Image (cartoon, grey):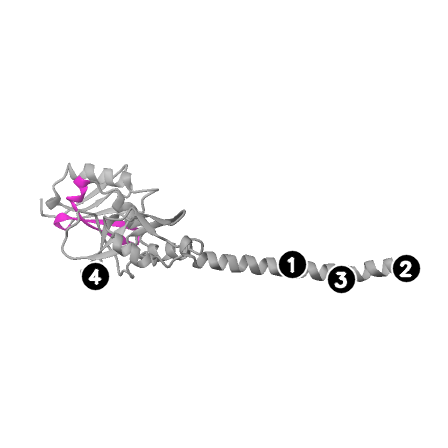
């Protein structure tokens, strides 16, 4: 091996070592630059826009739980954390968080819509959305919504499990039927409607929904006198069965 070959061999480790040093320096520079950028006021949030609030969710409540202020970096913005905190508000169904460069954060939310009133054995009443999420406790009866009976409710923002048939039946209660139906209750055979005058209507388990059963019930109610009726069974909606009260009519 001549001197030139020896020199080439000895230079190879040096080149590799120098390349490694440069790589480390580049990584350090990029890291320091990124950190500096996240702390720089040039990349801090100057404005937070909230779209979709105002009915049940206030602008102030969203801004409070979002936790975004002028010390928040646009680059280091925790989008997932903001989403999780804002969707933790019971009335919020969905949230999208957007960065609008250079300095604006936009929070777009969709509010839940109250669909039913759930009453528990103690008599307390709660608003639920169509999926069974508990929205708030209510006093009095300011809402003209179908009423369902449940054993208990959880914390606000949580979903009551096992009440899907009741919710599906409640969706099909039309305004004219609502005047007749006091509450919807679960039974071993499906859903029962408690009607005015102590009459009950057996709706059964329904199909995809309870539309046909409710239509059948509406038809029967136009043709009978409730004081004479004990049970209306529309679980087979094509063939409703009416049980009359003995000796009353």
Q: Which residue is mark 1?
A: 22
Of circles 2 and 3, the one toward us is 2
As helix, strand or loop, the secondary structure at mark 4 comes to loop
Question: Which residue lies at the image location 69% right of the left edge and 60% below the top edge?
Answer: 18
Q: Earlier in the sequence, mark 1 or mark 3?
A: 3
Q: Which residue is mark 4?
A: 121
Q: Earlier in the sequence, mark 2 or mark 4?
A: 2
Estimate the x, y position of residue 196 in percent, counting from the top left: 13, 48
Residue 13's disc number: 3
Question: Which residue lies at the image location 90% right of the left edge and 59% below the top edge?
Answer: 2
Closer-to-camera residue (23/158): 23
Question: How busy is the neighbourhood of tag 3: few (under 14 within 10 Å), some, or many (20 plus)?
Answer: few
The magenta-colored residue range is 175-198
Q: Are marks 2 and 3 in contact (CB under 8 Å)?
A: no
Q: Earlier in the sequence, mark 1 or mark 4?
A: 1
The alpha-carbon separation of the residues under discs 3 and 4 comes to 81 Å
């Amino acid at each position: 091996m001549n001197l030139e070959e020896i020199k080439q061999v000895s230079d190879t480790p040096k080149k590799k070592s120098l390349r490694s040093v440069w790589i480390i320096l580049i990584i350090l520079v990029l890291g320091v630059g990124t950190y500096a950028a996240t702390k720089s006021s040039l990349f801090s949030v100057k404005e937070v826009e909230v779209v979709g609030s105002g009915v049940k969710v206030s602008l102030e409540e969203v801004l409070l739980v979002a936790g975004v202020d002028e010390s928040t970096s646009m680059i280091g913005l925790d989008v997932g954390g903001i989403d999780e905190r804002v969707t933790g508000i019971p009335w919020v169904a969905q949230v999208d968080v957007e960065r609008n460069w250079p300095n604006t954060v936009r929070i777009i939310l969709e509010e839940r819509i109250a669909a039913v009133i759930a009453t528990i054995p103690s008599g307390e009443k709660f608003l639920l959305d169509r999926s069974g999420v508990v929205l708030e406790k209510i006093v009095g009866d300011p809402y003209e919504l179908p009423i369902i009976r449940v054993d208990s409710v959880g914390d606000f923002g949580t979903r009551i499990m096992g009440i899907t048939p009741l919710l599906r039946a409640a969706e099909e209660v039309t305004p004219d039927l609502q005047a007749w139906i006091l509450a919807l209750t679960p039974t071993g055979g499906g859903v029962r409607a408690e009607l005015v005058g102590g009459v009950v209507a057996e709706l059964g388990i329904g199909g995809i929904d309870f539309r046909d059963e409710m239509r059948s019930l509406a038809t029967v109610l136009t043709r009978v006198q409730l004081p004479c009726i004990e049970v209306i069974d529309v679980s087979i909606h094509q063939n409703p069965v009416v049980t009359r009260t003995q000796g009353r009519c």
